C-alpha cells in the first residue's frame, strides 16, 4: 500500500514536471509572432484604441529575483519581449496621435498570482519610450480606457518595478494649464562612455582612472524639461532614479532638478513617497526671481511686487484623500537687501484655498517695500519685468493693484520684524503685522511698530470686491522722542519734546495716487518741544519745509516751543484748519491747502517776529508748485515795499534807511498748551464709511469644514 502511494505521488510529480517542461519547451520554440495579429485585435477591442506590436514578439522563462524571499525566487516566470509597440491616443488629444510608442517592452510576469486573478508584473522595462498623456479641463484623460461592461473586472494588475532608458514624455493638463515635455537619457550610458574615456586617458598617461561617482547609485536618469505652465515658459534639467519601485508602500523615488519658470528660478532635491499612488513629496526647495509677484503662475498665490528675491526651505506635500496640503517649512531668504524666514501652509478648500503661517525678519529695508505699492523707480520696475508707468511729474505711485488675483486665495499671515530701516538715522523696531485676506478684502489689523522711543499703531483695510478698491486707514503715532528721531545730531540730545500724530482716511481707487485723490478724513500732528534747523529738515527729507525754514530763519538752529497741525481732507483736498510753529524767534502761521489729486501745493506762510530784530527782511512766503517741483519764495509786494522805503530814506539819511529793516515785534508766545490740546483731541470718524469690515482670521474649524466640502 505504501509502495502504491509512493508510486502515485512519484507519477504525479513526474507528470507535473513533464507538463511544465513541455510548456517551457513550447514557449521556447513557438513562434510568437504568429500570435501578434490576434493580440493586436484583442487589445484594440478592449481599450478602444489602435494597438499594434510591429516588431518581434518573444517569450522565454527566467528565474525569480534574488531579492524575493523563500521558494518564490526559484519559480520560473515568463518574460515577454515585444518590439516596436504602439498605442494610440483618443482623437481629441492635442498631446499627440500616439499615447505610447516604445522600441521594445520587456515584461516579467509572476505565474502563481494568476490563480488569484491578479496579474503581477514584477518588472516592466521600456526601451526608448515616447509617452504622451493628457487631462482635459473637464477631468477626462487619455489613460482611462473604455469600459466594455458595467460590472467591474474581477482581475487586477499590479506593477512592482518600472524602469526605462532614453525616451520622451509629454504631459498636457487643462486643469492646471500645464504643457510639459521631457527628454530622458540614461546616466549609466554616459557614465560608461565617460569612464571609457578616462580609462583611455589613464592608459596613455599611466595614471589611475578616477573611481565611478556615487551619484550613479542614487540617480539613473537625467532629463531636460521644456514647455509652459499657466502661460509661463518652462525650461530646466535634472536627475531621477532609473528604477521606480512600486510594490511596497512608503517607498521613495529620488529626484533632483533645476528649472526656469517664467521669471523664476526653481531648484528641488528630495524624494517622492509611494510613487505608485504618490502620497507625499519631500523636497529641499529653492526659489529665486526678479519679483515674488511672478510666482503667481507657479503657485496660484497672489504675492506682492518685490525687489529680486531668493529663498530656500523644506517643501512638504501630504495627500489627504484627493486633497494636497503643502507646507514650506523653515524657509530663509532675502528680498532685496532684507532678510525673511518662516513657515507657510497652503491648504486647498472651498470656496478658496487658504495661505497661513508666520514670517519674521531681522532687518527689513523700507526701499524693499516700495514695489509693493508701486513706489519704486521706473528703472526698478523694468528690472522686475514691469512697464515704466510712473510719470516724471508724479510723486505719488500710480501703478495699479491687480485685484483680479485677490479672489484666488484667502490668507492669514503674521509678520514680525525686529528692525525696519527707513534711513540711516530713523529705524522702525518691533514691527507686528497681521495680514488677512478673505473674499477679496485685504486688511492689516494691526500694523504696529516702534519708532524713536514711541509707537505707531494702524489698521488698514482694502476692499477689492468692486471695480475700484475702497480703502480705509486709521493711524496713531504716540510719544515719538524728538531727540531719538535724529540721534546723530548732538544738538538734539537735550531735547525732551515728543511728536504725536493721527490720521483717519478713506478713499477709493486702484493705486496709491487714486486713493489719495479721492480721500476724505482728517490728519494732524503735534510737536511739544525741541530744536529745528535746516540740517534736521534735510535729514528728515522734508524738502519743502527745509526751503521754508531757510527763508524764515536762515542757516541757524532754532528752539521750537511747539508745533500743531490739523488738516481736514475732502475729496482729495487737504485743507488746513490749524498749522502753527512757535519758536523763540517767531510765530509762524500756515494756511492754505494741498491738492492730493493734482499733487499741487497752495500754502501761505506768515512769520511774525518776536522782539526787536535788526536787518530782518521777513515777509509772507508762499509754497506752491507740484510735489515733484515745489516753488517756495517770498511774496514780492511786501518785500519790494520794504526795500523801496529803505532806498528812499537812504537818500535823506543813511541811518534812516535802517528803519524799514527793523522789525519791532510785539508777538506773544503761542498758547502751546491750548494748541496741543486742540490738535490732540479725539478726531471724528472718517467722512465715508468703509464698504466692508476688515477680514477676520480663518478658524481651524472653518478650514476642516471647507476641506471636507472639497473632498
Image: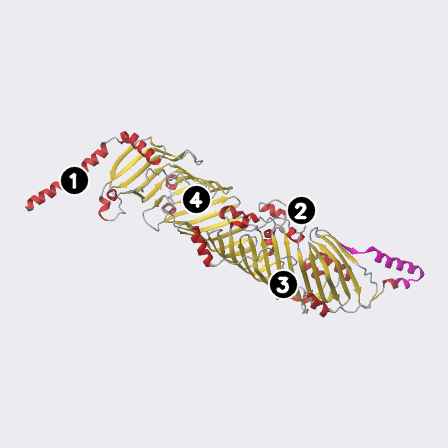
Residue 534: which numbered mark, if any? Answer: none
Which residue ends up furthest to the front in the rendered image? 150
**Residue 652 x/y as whole percent:** 94, 61
Q: Tell me the magenta residue range.
A: 630-657
Q: Residue 238 has which mark?
A: 4
Q: Position of residue 237 (x, y in %)?
A: 45, 43
Check contact, mark 2 vs mark 1: CB within 8 A.
no
Q: Is residue 649 magenta?
A: yes
Q: What colour scheme does the image use?
A: secondary structure
**Which residue corresponds to mark 3?**
476
Counting residues from the start of the chain, the first of labels 2 and 1 encountered is 1
> Is residue 382 something one can see in this rendering?
yes
Q: Which mark is residue 391?
A: 2
Q: Is residue 179 above or below residue 697?
A: above
Residue 16, disc: 1
Q: In the figure, 580 relative to 595: above or below? A: below
Amino acid at each position: 500500500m505504501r509502495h502504491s502511494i509512493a508510486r502515485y505521488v512519484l507519477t504525479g510529480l513526474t507528470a507535473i514536471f513533464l507538463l511544465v517542461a513541455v510548456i517551457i519547451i513550447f514557449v521556447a520554440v513557438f513562434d510568437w509572432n504568429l500570435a501578434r495579429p490576434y493580440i493586436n485585435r484583442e487589445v484594440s477591442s478592449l481599450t478602444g484604441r489602435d494597438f499594434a506590436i510591429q516588431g518581434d514578439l518573444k517569450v522565454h522563462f527566467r528565474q525569480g529575483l534574488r531579492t524575493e524571499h523563500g521558494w518564490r525566487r526559484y519559480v520560473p516566470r515568463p518574460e515577454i519581449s515585444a518590439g516596436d509597440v504602439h498605442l494610440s491616443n483618443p482623437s481629441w488629444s492635442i498631446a499627440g496621435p500616439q499615447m505610447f510608442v516604445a522600441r521594445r517592452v520587456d515584461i516579467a510576469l509572476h505565474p502563481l498570482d494568476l490563480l488569484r486573478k491578479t496579474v503581477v508584473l514584477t518588472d516592466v522595462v521600456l526601451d526608448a519610450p515616447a509617452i504622451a498623456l493628457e487631462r482635459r479641463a473637464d477631468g477626462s484623460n487619455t489613460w482611462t480606457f473604455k469600459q466594455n461592461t458595467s460590472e467591474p473586472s474581477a482581475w487586477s494588475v499590479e506593477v512592482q518595478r518600472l524602469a526605462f532608458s532614453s525616451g520622451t514624455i509629454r504631459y498636457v493638463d487643462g486643469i492646471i494649464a500645464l504643457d510639459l515635455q521631457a527628454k530622458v537619457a540614461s546616466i549609466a550610458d554616459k557614465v560608461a562612455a565617460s569612464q571609457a574615456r578616462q580609462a583611455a586617458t589613464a592608459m596613455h598617461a599611466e595614471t589611475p582612472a578616477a573611481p565611478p561617482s556615487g551619484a550613479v547609485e542614487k540617480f539613473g536618469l537625467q532629463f531636460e524639461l521644456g514647455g509652459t505652465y499657466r502661460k509661463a515658459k518652462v525650461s530646466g534639467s535634472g536627475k531621477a532614479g532609473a528604477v521606480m519601485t512600486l510594490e511596497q508602500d512608503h517607498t521613495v523615488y529620488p529626484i533632483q532638478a533645476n528649472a526656469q519658470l517664467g521669471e523664476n528660478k526653481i531648484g528641488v532635491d528630495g524624494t517622492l513617497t509611494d510613487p505608485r499612488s504618490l502620497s507625499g513629496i519631500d523636497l529641499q526647495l529653492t526659489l529665486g526671481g526678479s519679483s515674488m509677484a511672478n510666482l503667481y503662475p507657479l503657485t496660484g498665490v497672489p504675492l506682492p511686487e518685490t525687489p529680486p528675491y531668493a529663498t530656500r526651505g523644506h517643501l512638504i506635500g501630504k495627500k489627504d484623500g484627493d486633497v494636497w496640503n503643502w507646507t514650506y517649512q523653515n524657509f530663509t531668504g532675502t528680498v532685496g537687501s532684507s532678510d525673511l524666514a518662516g513657515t507657510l501652509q497652503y491648504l486647498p478648500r472651498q470656496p478658496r484655498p487658504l495661505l497661513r503661517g508666520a514670517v519674521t525678519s531681522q532687518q527689513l529695508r523700507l526701499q524693499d517695500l516700495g514695489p509693493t505699492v508701486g513706489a519704486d523707480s521706473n528703472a526698478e520696475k523694468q528690472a522686475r519685468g514691469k512697464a515704466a508707468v510712473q510719470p516724471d511729474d508724479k510723486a505719488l505711485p500710480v501703478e495699479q493693484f491687480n485685484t483680479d488675483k485677490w479672489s484666488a486665495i484667502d490668507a492669514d499671515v503674521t509678520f514680525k520684524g525686529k528692525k525696519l530701516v527707513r534711513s540711516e538715522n530713523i529705524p522702525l523696531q518691533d514691527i507686528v503685522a497681521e495680514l488677512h485676506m478673505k473674499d477679496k478684502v485685504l486688511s492689516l489689523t494691526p500694523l504696529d511698530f516702534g519708532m524713536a522711543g514711541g509707537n505707531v499703531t494702524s489698521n488698514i483695510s482694502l476692499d477689492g470686491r468692486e471695480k475700484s478698491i475702497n480703502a480705509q486707514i486709521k493711524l496713531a503715532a504716540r510719544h515719538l522722542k524728538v531727540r531719538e528721531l535724529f540721534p546723530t545730531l548732538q544738538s538734539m540730545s537735550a531735547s525732551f519734546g515728543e511728536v504725536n500724530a493721527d490720521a483717519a482716511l478713506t478713499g477709493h481707487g486702484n493705486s496709491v495716487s487714486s486713493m489719495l485723490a479721492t480721500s476724505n478724513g482728517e490728519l494732524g500732528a503735534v510737536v511739544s518741544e525741541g530744536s529745528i534747523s535746516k540740517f534736521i529738515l534735510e535729514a528728515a527729507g522734508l524738502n519743502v519745509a527745509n526751503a521754508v525754514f531757510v527763508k524764515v530763519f536762515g542757516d541757524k538752529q532754532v528752539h521750537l516751543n511747539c508745533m500743531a497741525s490739523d488738516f481736514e481732507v475732502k475729496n482729495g483736498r487737504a485743507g488746513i484748519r490749524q498749522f502753527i510753529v512757535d519758536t523763540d524767534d517767531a510765530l509762524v502761521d500756515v494756511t492754505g491747502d494741498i491738492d492730493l489729486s493734482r499733487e499741487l501745493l497752495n500754502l501761505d506762510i506768515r512769520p511774525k517776529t518776536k522782539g526787536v530784530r535788526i536787518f530782518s527782511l521777513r515777509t509772507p512766503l508762499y509754497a506752491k508748485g507740484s510735489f515733484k517741483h515745489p516753488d517756495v519764495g517770498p511774496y514780492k509786494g511786501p518785500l519790494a515795499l520794504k526795500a523801496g522805503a529803505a532806498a528812499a530814506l537812504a537818500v535823506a539819511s543813511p541811518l534812516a534807511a535802517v528803519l524799514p529793516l527793523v522789525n519791532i515785534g510785539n508777538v506773544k508766545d503761542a498758547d502751546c498748551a491750548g494748541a496741543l490740546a486742540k490738535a490732540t483731541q479725539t478726531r471724528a470718524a472718517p467722512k465715508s464709511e468703509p464698504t466692508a469690515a476688515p477680514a477676520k482670521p480663518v478658524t481651524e474649524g472653518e478650514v476642516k469644514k471647507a476641506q471636507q466640502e472639497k473632498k
